[in-house]
Image: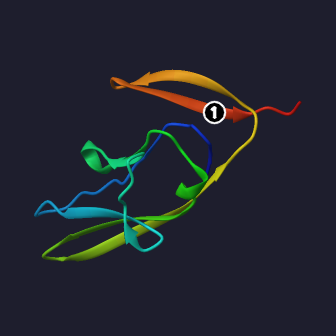
Amino acid sequence: MTLYEGQQYLLPCKVHGYPVPSYFWSHDGSLVVDIDVKVRVNNYLFFSNAKSSHSGWYTCTASNVHGTISHSVYVDVVSGKSVALFSNLRGQHLAQFYPLDL
């Protein structure tokens, strides 16, 4: 997936299980620890200000007594001219950026 520098984005991780699984997000194999990338309610990873350093593999891992499962996605943060469309998703004010070809 491609994000633009400065973009906000919610990356979902749908996890269901019994007992309720614990989960964590990693970036290129290390736990996500970044002031601009936070784990939100319902396992969403929130990019508040995408930067090129955020590019890489993001993996959501969930586990309980029955096992562990992971899913990964590659995030590519690029620079360039874009236009933002703002929306309100369940109380979250988000901007979606689209490239401009001038």
- Where is residue 98 drawn, in percent x and y? 69, 33
- Name, please, the residue furthest toward the right: 102
- Where is residue 83 drawn, in percent x and y? 69, 26
Q: Could you tell me which secondary element the residue under label 1 belongs to?
A: strand
Quarter occupied by residue 59 = bottom left
Quarter occupied by residue 33 = bottom left
Depth check: 89 or 49 in front? Answer: 49
Count of all numbered marks drawn on residues in the image: 1
- Where is residue 65 drawn, in percent x and y? 12, 76
Above/below status of 90 relative to 27 = above
Quarter occupied by residue 48 = top left
The quarter of the picture where the C terminus appears is: top right
Above/below status of 85 relative to 50 = above
Depth check: 77 or 71 in front? Answer: 77
Side of 69 where 59 appears, left or right:
right
Side of 30 where 99 appears, left or right:
right
Residue at 36%, 54% in the rendered image: 13
Residue at 57%, 37% in the rendered image: 6
Query: Could you tell me the amino acid type at mark 1?
Result: Phe
Side of 48 where 16 appears, left or right:
left
Residue identified by numbered label 1 = 97
| Res 1 seen here | no
- Where is residue 37 drawn, in percent x and y? 40, 49
Side of 82 where 40 appears, left or right:
left
Residue at 19%, 61% in the rendered image: 17
Above/below status of 52 relative to 41 = below
Above/below status of 93 relative to 43 = above
Q: How is the image coloured?
A: rainbow
| Res 30 seen here | yes
Circle 1 packing at 10 Å, graded few (<14), some (14-19), many (20+), is many
Residue at 49%, 22% in the rendered image: 87
